[in-house]
Structure formats: structure tokens, C-alpha cells
Image (cartoon, grey):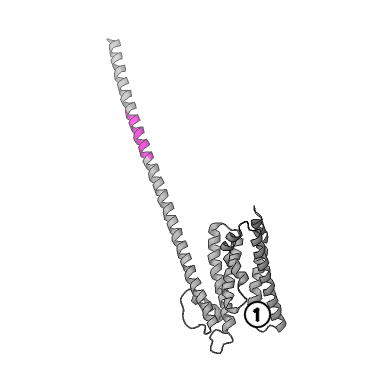
Amino acid sequence: MDRLTSWERRTSVALLAIGTGFLLSWAIPVLVPDLSPAAHKAFWYVQVATWALFTADYLIRVALAPRRLRFLLRNIPSLLVVLLPLLRPLWLLRALLLLQVIAERVQLPLRLRAVVYVTGTALFLCVVGSIAVLDVERDIPDSNIKTIGDALWWSLTTMTTVGYGDRFPVTAEGRLVASGLMIAGIALAGVVTAAIASWFVERFERTAALERRTEAELAQIATELAETRKALAELAHTHGALRDELATLTARLNS
């Protein structure tokens, strides 16, 4: 095991905790806007601290990587999490990148990882998108997204491409979040459709293979039965010949 892999395994749980703290320090002030200025400032410091920890983790991984250029090209989301500034329009993108970085460090079986990743990504984007749009829309006079309930409903209808139109963002930042949710919703729908289609194809192939194996076994049994029947016929013929010879011999002895 190389040093990079060892480091990633040792820090996977810590990274998950840091990421959770990063998101909570952003979400709580949005969901509870009546916090004191000191609390808002404290949460801001938590955001900066967690970002600094992510940066330190990334730099250590770069230093431990045996092929640094290859590592940089394969870990662009990690780099973007470090480089993107803490701007409100980029929260959804930062949150999605953070989810991808954490998912890469969590070891799960392949099938379970796909199910968890798709389901988790959908729920994660729905919640984070709701908080992001509420953050930028709530204080706008012409906005119709004023509560977390409104934001969740809007996020759900946007991700599922239903688009009732009863709730919609009016700011450029809110529309940027909406664009991200629409693209993510279509992408996730494609992934789910492909997964379901793959599951059906796999089941059909398994059934077809079972049928082919059964047909081959039946054909083999039929061949063995034919050979057995032939052997029995030959045995009966031999038995008849022996019986005739025995009868002839008996007749000669009696004469």
C-alpha cells in the first residue's frame, strides 16, 4: 500500500466529519436567520476553518502522490473545492463537488455504491439546492420563495423536471442554482434509467443463460436416454440370440 492510499484511508472519516461541518456551518444561518451576529461570525469561521482543512488535505495528497500530474488530472473536483471562493452562487457547485470528493473516499461494494451515490446525490442536491435558493431569494421583494417549505417544493419540482411554475427564482443567483438542479435532475434521471435498463438486461441474460443451460442438459439427457435405449436393444438382441442358442443346444442334447 502506497503512502497516498494509506493517508486517504486514515482520513476518510475525518473528511466526512469536516464536510458535514462545512455544510452545517453554511445551512444553519440560512435556516435560522435570527441568529445573533456573534453566531453568524462563528459559523463563518467554521466555514473558513473547514475550507483550510480541505486545502491542507489536498496539498498533503498532492505531496504523497507518486505521479503528481496524473493525480491533479484525476482529482479536479478536489482542486475546485479548494480554489472556488466562498461565494453564494457557487454553493451548490461546491456542495456537489464536496459530495463527489467524499464519495470517492468511502469504500463500498460497487452495486451498493451506485445505489447510495444516486440516491444520496438526489436527496443531497434537493436539500442543498433548496437552502441555496432560499438564501438568495428570501429577502427579494418580488420573490415567491420565502420559506424552506417553498424552497423544498421548488427544488423537488425542478429536479424532477415537472416545473409547476408556482415557485420560481427571480434573481440571477437563484436562476443559476435552478440551472444546476435542472441539469443534475436530467443527469440523475438518465443514470436511474440506465441502471434499471441494465438490471432488466442482466436479468434477461441470466434467464436466457439458464434456459440455454436447461436445454443443453435436456439434450444431453435425451442423448443419454437414446444411448441407453440402444444399449438395451442390443442387450435384448444378445439375450435373444443366447436364448436361441441355448434352446438349440438343449434340443440336440435331448435327441
Q: Residue at x 61, y 65 (%)?
A: 102
- Does the segment drawn in magenta span residue 223? yes
Q: Residue at x 55, y 59 (%)?
A: 112
Residue nearest the viewer, comparing 30 with 2 = 2
Residue nearest the viewer, comparing 32 with 180 = 180
> How far across and down, in percent of the image, does residue 143 sit?
54, 86
Of all residues, the one furthest to the left in this rendering is 255
Residue 147 visible in rendering: no
Residue 229, placed above or below residue 81:
above
Residue 222 visible in rendering: yes
SS at mark 1 in the image = helix
Q: Residue at x 60, y 66 (%)?
A: 78
Magenta-colored span? 220-233
Residue nearest the viewer, comparing 108 with 42 = 42
Of all residues, the one furthest to the bottom in this rendering is 141
Which residue is labeled 1 in the image?
29
Residue 215, placed above or below residue 241:
below
